[in-house]
Every structure is written in structure tokens, then in C-alpha cells.
Image (cartoon, rainbow, N blue to C red):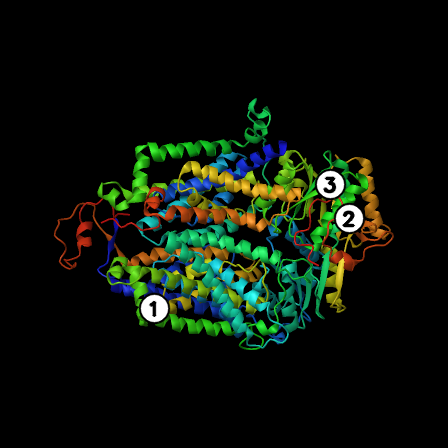
Amino acid sequence: MTRVSFARGAAFGAVALAAMLAGCSKEEKTTTTTTSTPMAPAASAVATAASGPLKIAFAYVGPVGDGGWTFAHDNARKALEKEYGDKIQTSFVEKVPEAADAERVFRDMASQGNTLIFGTTFGYMEPMLKTAADLKDVKFEHATGYKTAPNMNAYDSRTYEGAYMAGVIAGSMTKTNTLGVVGSIPIPEVIRNINSFTMGAQSVNPKIKTKVVWVNEWFNPPKETEAAQSLINGGADVLMQNTDSSAVLQTAGKAGKYAFGWDSDMKAYAPEAHLASSVINWAPYYIKTTKDALAGTWKGDQHSWWGVKEGAIDIVSISDKVPAEIKAKVDAVKAGLKDGSFVIWKGPITSNDGKEMVAAGTNADDKFMGGINFFVKGVEGKVPGGDKK
Amino acid sequence: MLKLETRPEPSRAMSIASPLIALAITVLIGTLLFVLLGKDPLRGLAVFFIEPLKSVYALSELAVKATPLLLIALGLAVCFRSNVWNIGAEGQFILGAIFASGMAMQATATTGSWFYIAVIAAGVVGGMMWAGIVALLRDRFNANEILVSLMLVYVAEQVLNYLVYGPWKDPAGYNFPQTITFLKSTQVPKLFPGFRVNVGVLVALVSVAAFWVLLFRTYAGFQLQVGGLAPAAARYAGFSSRKALWTALLISGGMAGLAGGLEVAGPLGQLTPHVPQGYGFAAIIVAFVGRLHPVGIVFSAILMSMFYIGGELAQSRLGLPKSLTGVFQGLLLFTLLACDTLIVYRIRWKSTRPAPATPAIDDAPLNPVVASTTLPAREGTI
Amino acid sequence: MDQFALLVAATLNSGTVLAFAALGLLINERAGIVNLGAEGLMLVAAVAGFATAFHTGNDWLAFGAGAAAGAILAAAFGVLVIWLNTNQYATGLALSLFGAGFSAFAGIRYSQEKLGEQHNFAIPGLADLPFVGPAFFRQHPMVYLAIGLTVAIAWFLHRSRAGLVLRAVGESPESAHALGYPVRKIRLAAVVVGGALCGVAGAYISVVYTHLWVEGMTAGKGWIALALTTFATWRPARVLLGAYLFGGVTMLQLQLQGEGVQISSQFLTMLPYLATILVLVLISRNASFIRVNMPASIGKPFFPG
């Protein structure tokens, strides 16, 4: 082949490609489904689903297959579909980074006709706010954040209740009186969980102490493995995690120690090591929100924080190795949380450097709990970057 | 058997056709993948190639995504043409973002709206400084710039983490690792209300022109290129390779820092641990696919952005996994690199019997390479 | 003392992953080829290894699958870089990107699966010795294999004729070519073997180290291995020690955290990379240092004739 014919061939190829793409766009226009609307910014482009199904979209920070956080959200989405059937249509985008790209994803979801959008991680807060400000007809729900808008709510789950109940089990099963927690990012939610876990354990075994190791990520199985291993090396025989994969549980299994599942039921990953799983069930909240949206009674600027009482938190698959009286205690706590008679964060609560943080006879309120950055007595070490105030 | 034979001179036609052929092959493989996954291939291709261009808003998003790629790739083009292999543009991007954030946090309620210029300038300085370390170590100690710049990417990531988890953490941010949201005066002005595209696009387009002039119309650019193509000739002509090294690294570092600054002062509005998005590495691909030419880079930046955005859309429209984006980008570069060989070589079918030593009549008689491929060779066969 | 023994054991385990990958890269670079695609290679091998372990239940087959996956991808890389003379860094980066995407894609099916129970290994008798028992003798066989491999590679490079030829190719491919050696075939062989070793490292991560498949699970270990090869000035024994050092720093940092010691974790994470830069500076200062320590033709394309 000579140079000239190669060039001709290439030119032909380019023309063919262009023709094919041109043909594509024609095809796109004739198949009139809602999915072919181009991305658009203005509120006017949002299709109001007055007669069609309510379109709901979910943005996930991790992969659906993480077996933990995102998995729990997706399970709730599926429950939603089961509950409402034809009345709704759901879709999701996974691994949306907590960065500038998130805004584009939200806008695109809105332009596709979704009028109820869920963002399932803290890092989506600012992008969602920006999008909500422009698209006033769309309802936004943001998980684990603290800012709201007339068309944006913040919702969260009281994972600390699950952590407390796990702590009760941990305190009774430990032989070395050393518990370990693999922490993700040192934000108040995680600190609160570590504290609640410790307090739960102390309620059955005042001698325990808790060691904490930070992975500085929500999801990084190799690092979680190493963190778990280092805790075991340091003497911990019951592990807890605030990260999203089953690596900690599996590491405990390999070393013959105990651990808990987190966010989802992880029993299958290491049945011998698994004591219980503290799970989040987002379905009740998602179903209620969808009900409101369908009925037209949805309100913005709300902060919802649901726990055991509303069916959002549970401790499941408790192992047979746990003695019956401990199981009974956990059930009692659960019942107390359900009817409001049991309060986890009631004073006196002392930090691990001796200060009294919650006075005797008082209960910590949601605002206090939202900004926790101290460790309670029994937890070793300081909250990284925590004593800034 | 098939042999590769050097062309008498590099083929200009192939130089333009090669990226198109590479794209065509990538599209072909992509179509195959879609079919294997049970999705309509034409819709799949449309999502990647048509959707991102379909509306003004889409074009604006494309511009937002393409701008940092374009800026970094322009700088890298200068670097690579000078035979300086700056693989650490990602680190320089991060330092640009850090410096820009540091400057942005100096703004108070009374700062004028021109302040964003200072913020971006700080970004440029940050990137240049980080690349300067690479230049210094190569200049004084002969340390390989590829490895040093790559290591510095990781160091940069840790510096970023240290700052957002520590001294720069927003005290009102519930202990989340992020800085305050920067004030309006630090924000790069948007071009049109309702769209995210901002002044950065203009900066990018001006840069394209500036780099074209630098590379092809200035003496300095000429020196840089000669230094890259024929170092011995450059030395003989008295071109300073030291000057070339510093120029190339400072320019590419500055451009990466500029992109980082624009990202932070533009769509992001604060510094978070998620600032590094891999643009520095993707820009290397953009630079190559654009044949290290400013105009070519514009097209390849747009193409890469289409892959990114298309990958997102493919998820919500077709239920395809996000990992496809990486597959396409990698495939594109692979095929492009393979096709590029056709610019310098051509494929010939040669019999395995050694031909007589006299070259064929229509071949250039003075081409020693042609002569050597007619002898039985240990090398030179596929 | 007990804790320290456990720390040593954890270090050996963590370092083994890096050791395999870095040894593979060492062989590549000794022949003059830099494979920036190590991370992508390891990921594809990890998913191949996991899939094999999942379907066959045999860990050793899984390692083989990982090695094969690594070798195949490396061969593709090698053909492009050695015969078509494409730019090594760009091609390596393309491999990295492609490998990351492809592994995520192929691994979707496996992301929730789990493998069978893990065995705990112990060398009978030796494992019960005080301190050294838990520290050294309760490891997975691959840990010992890594040590053996290091010895074998060191012998190969410095004591065998084939190794001498390899090093010659890495120092000056033109001279080797002039002497009649098939430089390109040798380089390809080096790249394929190196890729296979990186593949083994990747499979080890998913099958033994973390016992899971998740996308991107190598989390930068491929890049660390690249740094490690340089840090070790391309000597196998130093690579192994460096791998343990890098692995040890990570485990130490975590252990210190657990004790409540407040050292900035970011600073500790930075250390291996800063150390590598320092080593680079030290060995490159001097023209003769470089000649002794670094394969001269690294990164440069070779054109026969």
C-alpha cells in the first residue's frame, strides 16, 4: 500500500464514521423515550411527571457491590420499587466522586425528568445545594449532611444506636478487655459511634478499653485489613468498624478473633468471627419520602434523624456464641429505644481527659451529638484534629 | 512475512489519519463490548459521542471538563517535545490547587471581585514551584525526572491531606476534612448565567494560541524542539539544555498549577481531599493523542472529556458500569500509539528468501534502511 | 515483645506483595524497559486470580492465573514498546488506565462474592519458638517464596550468563545487538516475566491478603513498587528489604495510632516516596555512581540497524 491509498482509506474511514454517527443521532430522535432528552440547566427543561410515574434518582459514592454503605442504599431503592411498583421509576449512578463532577450528575438527573433525587454521602452537600438553588422544582434529599434548603432535606440514621448495641455484645465477649475500632474519617458521626460502642461495652464490662486506628477513607479493603491486623496485634480481640467493606471482619476471622458487620449483614463473610451486624435500613425513610412526594405533602428544610424507633437501625444475625442473657439485654435496649424509655447519651458523660461533657441528670440533645469531637473515657488516644475550638 | 520498514520521510497523511484510525478501532471494540453486554451499540455510542454535544448546557459541561485537560496538556506538549518527561503533572495540579486555596482564604468580605486573578496566579506559582523541584534535582543531581516527578505526586497528595485534615480544616465544618467555602470574590466569573463554564475556557483558548506561537514561531520554541529531537545538534548549535529543562518544567508546572487553581476557584469553591481527579495523568494521554500540537490537543481534550461525561451518562441512561470510561481511554491511547508507528514505518509484505542486494528501482537508492531490510535480518521482523 | 513479633509478621506479609511486584519491575528495568502500567497489570491479575480461586477453590491455580494475566498484558505492552517503538511512558500509562477500567468491568460479577475459609499456615516445630515463631514461621508460603525468588533473581542476574546478557541489554542495547544478541526478544522476555511477577503480586492481594475483590483494590501498590525498584537501586536483595521497610512503615504507623501516639499519618505515608527521591538524588549525583547503579538504557527506545 502506498502513502496515497492509505490516506484515501483513512479519509473514507473518517467519512464512514461520521455517517454512522449522523445516522445515530437520527435514530435517537425517533425513539422517543424520556431518556433521550439532552442535558439542560434551566428549571423549565425539567419534565413534570404529572401523569407519568414519579422518577427518582440516586447518586452513590461507592460501587453497589461494596457490601456495605452503598449496598444498603441500593437495597432500600429496590425495596422502594417493590413497594410502589408502577407508580415510580428509579435509576442510579454509582461512584459519583465527591467533587465538582457531582453537580453535573445531579443536573443531568434533573434534566432526565427525575423530580426526587437522593445524594448518599456527605461530600455531595455543596454540589446539591448549588443545584437545588437553580432547580427549584426538584426535591433533593441529602444523607449525613447538615445544610438544607426549601427544596432540600438532610437525613441521617442513628448508627450510634447500632454501635451501642454492638458494644454491649462486645463487652461481654472480650477476653482481653481490649476492643478495637477501624475508623474511617474522624467526623462527628464516626466519633459518636466509637463512643457509643465503648459506652455499650462499659455497661456490661466496665474494665474494657477501646483502641482506634484511622484509615482516612470510607472504603479501602487492603488498608482496612492492615488496620484490623494492627489492632489485633495490639491486643484487641473484638473488632468494630466504621468503614464500608467486609475486610475487617474477614481479617478477624483469619486471626480467630471476633468482629461485627457494619451497614449491611456481613455474616456470610466470616460466620465464625461474626458476632452481629449493625445494619442500616434506609427503606422506611425512602418509602415515607416517596409517599410524601406522591401525595404532594413533601416539605423541604427538614433534618431527619431516624434510628431504631423508626426501623432504620437494627442489630441482626446475632451469633449463637453470644450468651442468652446478653441477647436479652440487647433486646431490652432495642425495646427501650423503640418506645423512647432508653437514652444512650445521658449524663454523666466524661471525656477521656477528665472533662465532664454531659452533666449528670441531663440528656445530650441532637445538636450536641451532631458536633461531637471528643472521646469518652475508655477510648485511647485523641480525636485527630479534634481539639481545634 | 510482515515487516516494518522505515518510510523515506514521515507520512503527513498518516499523521492526521492515525488518530482517526485509532478512534475508529476504539469505537469498533466499544461496539463489540456493548453487544456483549446486551446493550444497543448505537445507543451506547450515541451516549458517548452525541449526548455530550447535544445542547448548549452539554457543551458548557464539556468545556468545564476539557479546560483543565487542555491546559495541562499544552504544558506537557512543550515538555515532551523537549524530551523532558514530566509525569508528575498531577502533583503540580494539586500544589496549584493548594496555593490557590491558600490565597483564596486570605479574602475577606471587603475584597474586590478582581481577587480571583490573584488566586489563579497563586495556583500558577504553586505548580511552578513543585515542577521546579524536579528541575532542580535533575539539573544539580541528574536525578531522573520521571521518577522524581512521579514520587512528588504522592507527596503532594499527602500534603493536601495534611492541610485539609489539619490546619486548614473549616472550624465550622463538623470536623469534615475540607476548607471553608471560598468567598464570592475569589470565584472565577462564569461566562453565562446558568452555565458552569467560566473564564477558564477563555484562558485555555488564549493559551492554545500562545503555545502555538511559542512552539512554532519563536526562537525559544525552536531551541526546545531541536533539543528534544536531536540533542547532539542542539549542543553543537549552542542551545542550552539546562535552559530547556527549566523552561519546559516551569511551563508545564505552571500550566498544571493554573488548571488546579481554576478548578478550586471555579466549580469546586473549596479545597477537599478529592481535588486530585487524575487530570494530570489523563492530560498525558490528551497530549499524545493531540500529537503534541496545540490545535490537536484541543480536539483530543474534547474527545477525552466526551469519554468522561459519556461514561457518567452511560450509567444513568444505559445502566452501563462506570469502568467503561477507563477502558475506552486506555484503548484509545493503545491503538493510537500502535497506529502512530505507521507514520514513521510502513508495513510491507516480504518474502523470507533473501532478495538480491540491489535495491528495487523505484525505492530511493540512498536509503540504507531499505537496503538492510532485504538482507536476512535477526531483527526487524514481527 | 509479643506485639513486636506480631508487627514483624504483619510487615513480612505486607512487604511480600510489594516484593513480588518490585522484583518483576526490576527485571523489566534491568532490560531497560520502564513499565508504568504495573498498577493496571496488578488489578487485572487480581480479578483473574480472584475469579479462579472463586471457581476452582485452588489458591495456587489463582496465582497461576494472575501470572498469566500479567504476562499477557505485559506481552501486549512489550510488542508495542519494543517492536513498534511506541513511547514507553505513554504506553505504560495507557496500560494502567485500561487495566483499572477493564478489571473494574470484569470484576463486577465478583464484587460481592467471598472465597472459602482461609488457612492459617505454620511451619511445624519452628512456629512454636518464642518470638521468632510468631514473627517468622506462621506465614503464607508465598512469603517464603518471595524470599526464595529474591535469591534466585540475584543469582540469575549476577551469576549466570543469561543474566549477564540481560544486564548488557539494559546497559547498552546497541552494543549487545552488535554482538549478535537478539536484543528485542530478550527485552520482550524480560517484560513478560516481569509482568507475570506483577500478576502474582496482584493475585496475592485479592486471594490472600484481603480475600475479596473490589475495584481499585491495589490502591497504589503498583506505583509504590515502581518507587521501590528505584529506591533499591535495582538490586534484588535491596528490593526485598525495601519492600519490608515500606510495608513495615505502614504497619508501624497503624500500630502507633492504636497506641494513641499522635504522629501525623500523612507524614508517615509520605516517607517512602521522600526516601525514594533521596536515594535517586544520591545515586545520580555522580556519573560513575549512575553507571554502577542504574541501567543506562532505561526508558530509551532501541532501534536495531
**Which residue lies at the image location 29% right of the left edge and 38% below the top edge?**
C165
Q: Which amino acid does label 2 sit on?
A: Gly
Q: What element carries label 2?
A: loop
Q: How crowded is mark 2: few (under 14 residues within 10 Å), some or many (20 or more)?
A: few
In the image, A316 versus A86, the foreground residue is: A316
In which image quadrant can residue B243 be found? bottom left
Q: Mark 3 points at which residue?
A: A209
Left or right, C245 with reference to B216: right
Q: Name the residue under label 1.
A: B215
Image position, residue A180 (x, y; %): 68, 41
Q: Are marks 2 and 3 in contact (CB under 8 Å)?
A: no
> Do badges 2 and 1 share one subunit?
no
In the rendered structure, the residue with mark 3 lies on which chain? Answer: A
Q: What element carries label 3?
A: strand
Point out the frontmost of discs 2 and 1. Answer: 2
Image position, residue A50 (x, y; %): 69, 71
Q: Which amino acid does label 3 sit on?
A: Lys
> Do badges 2 and 3 share one subunit?
yes
Is the residue A17 above or below the residue C189 in the image? below
In the rendered structure, the residue with mark 2 lies on which chain? Answer: A
Left or right, B161 with reference to C171: right
In which image quadrant can residue B171 be found? bottom right
Residue A229 visible: yes
Q: Mark 2 points at which residue?
A: A354
Left or right, A314 with reference to A244: right
Picture disc at residue B98: none
In the image, A314 versus C24, the foreground residue is: C24
In which image quadrant can residue B101 be found? bottom right
Mark pair 3, 1: CA separation: 65 Å
Q: What element carries label 1?
A: helix
Q: What residue type is labelled 1?
A: Leu
